[in-house]
Each structure stands twice: as C-alpha cells, then as structure tokens.
Image (cartoon, coloured by chain):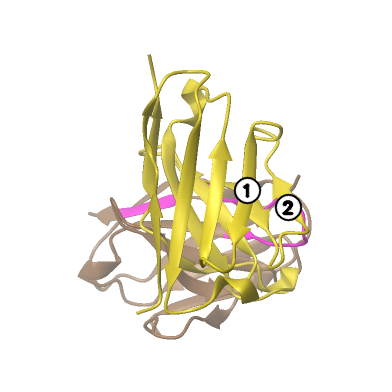
C-alpha cells in the first residue's frame, strides 16, 4: 500500500526541539519533492517546507525559517523535520505530503500522511 | 506572496443540491490550482488539479473551472459523503505554496 506515516510529535516546552519523521512505503521518495504542511486544530492548512529529490534544494515558510530544517534519507525512504526554538504558535498537526511531480507545475499534493500533533506548551 | 481567498466560508446545503465554491488569487496563477476535501481528523484528499483536471478515483460530480485569478469548485449533486471542508491551493512557482482559508459545507 502506498502511504506516508508521520511520527515524533508530542508535548514540548517553548524553546524546545522535536524531530518529526515521515516514513514512506509502497513507493520510493527518491523520485519526489516532499513537503511538510501543518494545521492548527480547527484552522486551515499552512505550507511549511519542501525538499527536492536529492536534498540540494530546500524551501521554508517565513514563519519557520531559521528554526526548522527539512531533510531526507532516501535509503531509509524517510523524510524529516527538525524543529528548534519551538513557540506556542507552532502547535499544530504536521502532515508530510508528496507532490505529483518534480516540476512546480505538478506541485499539488497527491499523497498525505495522517499527521502528527505537535503541542508547544509549558 | 500570493494570497488566496475563498467564498463562502460556510455553506449550508441539502443532499442533491448543486454547490459552488469560489477561490480567488491575489495575482494570476494561470491554471495552477488544486482543490482538496478534508474531513475532521483526516488528511486532505486531492479532488482537482490544474484547475479542472479530476484526480483519479474522484467522483465525476466534482468539477473545477477557472484560470488567472478566479476559480470555482462545483459539486453537481451533493451527497452525504460530501459534507466536509474544501480548500484551494495555488502552486504557481517553486516559491511558497499557499492554501485558501477553507469552505465548510454543512447540512442545512
């Protein structure tokens, strides 16, 4: 079955760190740009970060730039999001997602994980 | 950055109704727009890409149209499984992806 499964979420104090993982199965991530998208419970979707197939190109939303780092291990078929200096406003469900193709004209999300909840609170 | 708006924010409808949701971009995005359906506690599900292309497996009662800055998602005959929140998303370049704020379709 083609799927993405996130892990690593949880409760962390402001200023703390977490590392999210996204394990892919049923396909190889090495052929795809991969992204993180988050959603505050009850609110809308917000794009967070993207990484190209060989990890030579990354992009970040202004709200996380300098604090979050996206990475990937194609051998392990896994995507990561290192989250540092966490703030209360980072509290959200974090989804990993695959886009349909390598060109930006295919940057719609055709596969999503179920998400992992990150809660930043003292 | 390109900003996306959606209208209405909430829509009350009955089974069998024809439903239309509008999404507007702050600048032209050609046809680079997707639509998603999301149910509570679930991940979004791709419905439409490139403004009007139906994703495989999505019922044909869903359709999309538009180009430039104005787009619509139409559900031709609303079914019980369609009560959900719908988001548009622009992907105009390798820069920031942005989503609309969502339209919740609930039961009248």
| Residue hosting label 1 | A70
Q: Are marks 2 and 1 in contact (CB under 8 Å)?
A: yes
SS for callout 2: strand
Name the side, left or right, on which B46 lies relative to B2: left
Picture layout, residue B78 above or below residue A8: below
Give me the disc on residue A58: 2
Classify mark 1: residues with Cα within 10 Å, few (<14), some (14-19) or many (20+).
many
Q: Chain of mark 1?
A: A
In the image, B59 versus B55, the foreground residue is B55
Question: x, y (%) of residue B6?
Answer: 54, 51
**Where are the magenta residues, as a range?**
B89-105
The chain letter of the yellow chain reads: A
Does residue B50 show up?
Answer: no
Residue B55 included in the magenta stretch of the image: no
Q: Secondary structure at mark 1?
A: strand
Residue that appears at 52% across and 74% down: B48
The answer to which of marks 2 and 1 sits earlier in the sequence is 2
The chain coloured brown is B
Assess disc 2: are there few (<14), some (14-19) or many (≥20) residues with their C-alpha within 10 Å of its C-alpha: some
Q: Residue A69 in the image: x percent, y percent? A: 64, 42
- Residue at the image point whose x is 47% and y is 45% from the top: A20
């Amino acid at each position: 079955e083609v799927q993405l499964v996130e892990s690593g979420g949880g409760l962390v104090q402001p200023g703390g760190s977490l590392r999210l993982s996204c394990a892919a199965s049923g396909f190889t991530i090495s052929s795809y740009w991969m992204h993180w998208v988050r959603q505050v419970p009850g609110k809308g979707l917000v794009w967070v970060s993207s990484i190209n197939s060989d990890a030579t190109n990354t992009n970040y939303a202004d709200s996380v730039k300098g604090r979050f780092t996206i990475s990937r291990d194609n051998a392990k078929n896994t995507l990561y999001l290192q989250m540092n200096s966490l703030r209360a406003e980072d509290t959200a469900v974090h989804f990993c997602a695959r886009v349909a193709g390598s060109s930006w004209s295919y940057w719609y999300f055709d596969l999503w994980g179920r998400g992992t909840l990150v809660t930043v609170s003292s | 950055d390109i900003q996306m708006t959606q209208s209405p924010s909430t829509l009350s409808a009955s089974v069998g109704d024809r439903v239309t949701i509008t999404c507007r971009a702050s600048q032209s995005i050609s046809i680079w727009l997707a639509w998603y359906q999301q149910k509570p506690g679930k991940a979004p599900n791709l419905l439409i890409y490139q403004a009007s292309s139906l994703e495989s497996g999505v019922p044909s009662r869903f359709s999309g149209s538009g180009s430039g800055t104005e787009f619509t998602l139409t559900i031709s005959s609303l079914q019980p499984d369609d009560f959900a929140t719908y988001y548009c998303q622009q992907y105009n370049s390798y820069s920031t992806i942005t989503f609309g704020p969502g339209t919740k379709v609930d039961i009248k």
